[in-house]
Image (tube, rainbow, N blue to C red):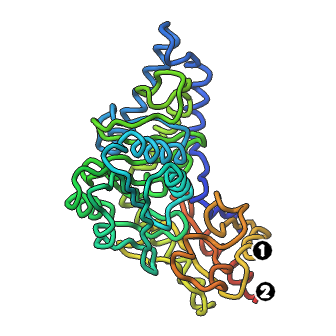
Amino acid sequence: MPPAEVYLDNSATTPVFPEVIAAMEKVMREEYGNPSSLHRRGSGADRMMEMARQTIAELLCVSSEEIIFTSGGTESNNLAIMGIARRNRRRGDHLVTTLIEHSSILEPFQQLEKEGFRVTYLLPDERGLVDPAKAVAAVNSDTILVSIMHVNNEIGSLQPVSRLASAIKARNPRLFFHVDAVQSFGKLPLHPGEAGIDALSISAHKFHGPRGMGALFLRRGIHIDPLLYGGGHERGLRAGTENTPGVVGMALAARLSCRDQQQKINKLASLKERMLAAVEPVNPWLKVNGPRGGEEAAPHILNISFPGLKGELILHALEEHKVYISTGSACHSNKKGPSHVLQALRLDERSMEGAIRISLSEQNTAEQIDYAATALNKVIAELS
């Protein structure tokens, strides 16, 4: 009997864990006070906030004082980039990032260029990997911030962020290193303190938590300018009444996602290989975009092109089989034109148009992958 549906768009968002829904409902029902209020209702909500903050900190192996709650990955990225650059401009006006970052990284950098900052955009190799030597060469004495994502949301390239941090800081120890870990947290281990990372962004809905919740790790002693004004929340860095249910839900989702991590990595990598092994022999002309596997590839993201076909047509044809995939980043789904990530890989136009992204979660099964692969082979045969 075929599955009711096969959801393979987990890099866009993930289904919320049932335990998280239950925990958030309980908080909304029983701990509805404003955490900033001085009465018992407020102090109860505040305790839950701080317990959640400690949970996130422990999972990252950092201090709870270094965790700032935000509305998601976009805000965390904006706060880190804009906040660090603007606050530290007296130390330099040069910034470094890559051409394959998420739009919530690239657009803040573009805004900072309008404000007079100079930005170097690193071009990755054809697998989507940044050469540490090129990153080092881009850094100079005026560089105040480098931002490089851990896992690319479209092609799954896994950047050696620890090695990058060590190399660029050897050249300029005074710069700050930010990592967008939205696509890796809960799937791959990364401890920012040990890796030489000064700021790190996560987003709850990428690891089976609620939408509208995220966090920023900011190493103790780093001063930044806030984006929002109007209160002393989050040490004055994020004004606005705290979302207690969302914070509690995010912390629980994080704890559940980070359990048995190596086992999860093995499962995801196996499912990814299973999909490719079922589809590639039937369609040997397909192209894998980004690293195929190993230490350079995230275990949960597979981007493949069927040159000459349209990725959007493949997506909608699979939808008829109740298989849900993506053509790339959900944030770009309404924009015309090829993906900037695939452009940076120097793909030809036919390959970019025929690209689809399959992204997995721990909730997927081998049976689902087999069904999805059979459906994909059928769709490709019909469209070819």
Q: On the rendered image, what quadrant is the C terminus found in?
A: bottom right
Residue sitting at the far front: 116
- Which residue has dot 2 on it? 382
From the viewer's side, name the closer residue of 29 and 316.
316
Residue visible at 34% across and 45% down?
Answer: 60
Q: On the rendered image, what quadrant is the N terminus found in?
A: bottom right
Residue 349 image offset from top left, x and y in percent: 65, 84
Residue visible at 42% across and 64% down?
Answer: 120
Corner quadrant of residue 33: top right
Residue 150 image offset from top left, x and y in percent: 41, 60
Query: Which label number is shown at residue 127?
Result: none
From the viewer's side, name the closer residue of 300 and 132.
132
Q: CA distance from mark 2 to mark 1?
A: 9 Å
Q: Amino acid at mark 2?
A: Glu
Question: Dot 2 surroundings within 10 Å: few (below 14), some, or many (20 or more)?
Answer: few
Residue 38 image offset from top left, x and y in percent: 47, 8
- Secondary structure under the numbered disc 2 in the rendered image: helix
- Which residue has dot 1 on it? 317
Residue visible at 77% across and 75% down?
Answer: 313
Q: Amino acid at mark 1?
A: Ala
- Secondary structure under the numbered disc 1 in the rendered image: helix
Corner quadrant of residue 134: bottom left
Question: Dot 1 surroundings within 10 Å: few (below 14), some, or many (20 or more)?
Answer: many
Residue 7 is left or right of residue 196, and the answer is right
Corner quadrant of residue 325: bottom right
- Residue 47's place in the image compared with 155, above or below, is above
Circles 2 and 1 in contact, beta carbons < 8 Å: yes
Q: Earlier in the sequence, mark 2 or mark 1?
A: 1
Residue 264 seen in render: no
Residue 16 image offset from top left, x and y in percent: 59, 46
Residue 69 seen in render: yes
Residue 81 is left or right of residue 341, and the answer is left
